[in-house]
Amino acid sequence: MTLPFIEDDYPRALAEAKAKNKLLFVDVWATWCHACLSLKSYVFSAPEMRKVADQFVWLSVDNENEKNLAFVEKYKSDGLPALWVVDASGQVLWRLMGTLSAPELVAELQSVGNKTVPAAQASLESAYLEATRADARKDEAAAAKAYEKVLAMAPANWPKRPAAVVAYVNGLGMSKQNDRCTALALKELPSMPLAYRVTLAGTAAMCARGAAKGTAANAALGALIKELTDIAHTKASVLPDDRSDIFRLLISSLKATDQSAAAKQMANEWVTFLEDEARRASDPQARAVFDSHRTAAYTEVGDPGRAIPMLQESERDFPKDYNPSTRLSRVYLRLKRYDEALDAANRGLAKAYGPSKLSVYQLKADIAAAKSDRVLERKTLDDALLFASTLPPLSDWQIESRAELTERRRKLGPAAPP
């Protein structure tokens, strides 16, 4: 089925929600985000979504489109995809970073849309709203306090508990509280529905790898590797992109524990899995969901050039998308095919927009540096900084990227006189 998404027009969508007395569902995404593309191809189009199609007004927000600046500034996200439900006044009712299968998303939305809350749960629902709104403000301290309160109050069978756990653990991870992140995830993992278990295990593995050596969190990485392996090999239904993420995290975790042979074996399994899924894809958009992971997997097994035909196909299928060209450029750079890398980067730059265009400029500068072309490197960095000056500050990454570009340009020194 096709959900009636309004594209990049929050005022119109909110007005429609008010006029129809409906809640507003918002999908915040970006063109580079493979999980976002997975939701579009494998979840929002699923037949199960008919059950809730008429209960919401549906809005799609490109996180890097300047038209969406007001929404992005008001509803802050630490990562993508970010899914929101807000009421007609714009108040947050539900928030999830990550993905769910269609049946799981339907269950969540039916719960959010249930306007009759038992009196016994009123204080719990209020605490959950407080937590999600603190998240939206990026008030980490308030959000952590509120989520602690929610989890202390929530019974094991509360429908929103999994989303609350995932949001809290993600917040702990984003704030580098690796010990608490890992401990809470390990405690909650056994009771998580599968899609939440996937997200939680992945976050916990990253926290465990980031924890100091010798700590309980770091020592838990072995248990999390087993958890990730079980998910990678489960016969249960998991979104293909989510399963691919598990392979990626598993490989990096095996490397972190000096299990190089096991990591190599898992990388080959990853390649096989991704190629099988790409062959089964129903259309080019569904196939392209796997482009970034296939490129990474081929690189992991030492054969990055294997991605070239796939990315060339995506360039043809999606002539307005900068991502295939940019990924192709990175492959050529890795193979030291510098002229082809530069051509592909220029094709990407011509189509890129928003903060991510800065990463394409950085790529072009890297190619110029590899070619020892300091004139081109300086000009590319100057062009990047000029473009950066036109962007509204949307993210910490963007601010950090601009600082890195500035420092890199400074180190190159002034251009030689003509």
Image: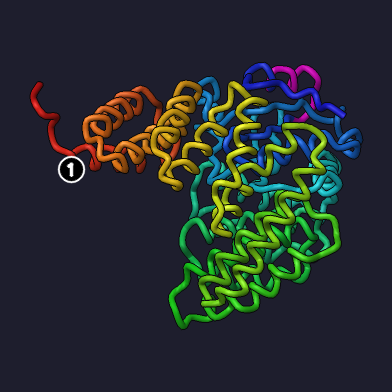
Relative to 292, residue 18 above or below: above
Q: Which residue is drawn at 60% across and 47% down?
A: 306
**Residue pictured at 22% horizontal, 30% vertical:** 375
Q: Is the magenta stretch mostly helix, strand or loop?
A: helix
Q: Is residue 20 magenta?
A: yes
In the picture, measured across the screen, residue 66 lies left or right of residue 221, that is left
Residue on which the image places disc 1: 411
Residue 156 location, x and y as percent? 79, 66
Location of residue 202 (image quadrant): bottom right
Task: Determine which quarter of the picture holds residue 385.
Answer: top left
Left/right placement of residue 390 relative to residue 207 reads: left
Looking at the picture, how far across and down is residue 358, in whole percent? 40, 33
Q: In which quarter of the image is the N terminus?
A: top right
Q: Which quarter of the image is occupied by the C terminus?
A: top left
- Residue numbers of the magenta segment: 14-23
Res. 96 in view: yes
In the rendering, at what x and y percent does residue 123 appear?
Answer: 72, 53
Q: Give the camera-side residue of 301 and 356.
A: 301
Judged from this view, the residue extending furthest toward the bottom is 214
Residue flagged by tag 1: what amino acid is it? Lys
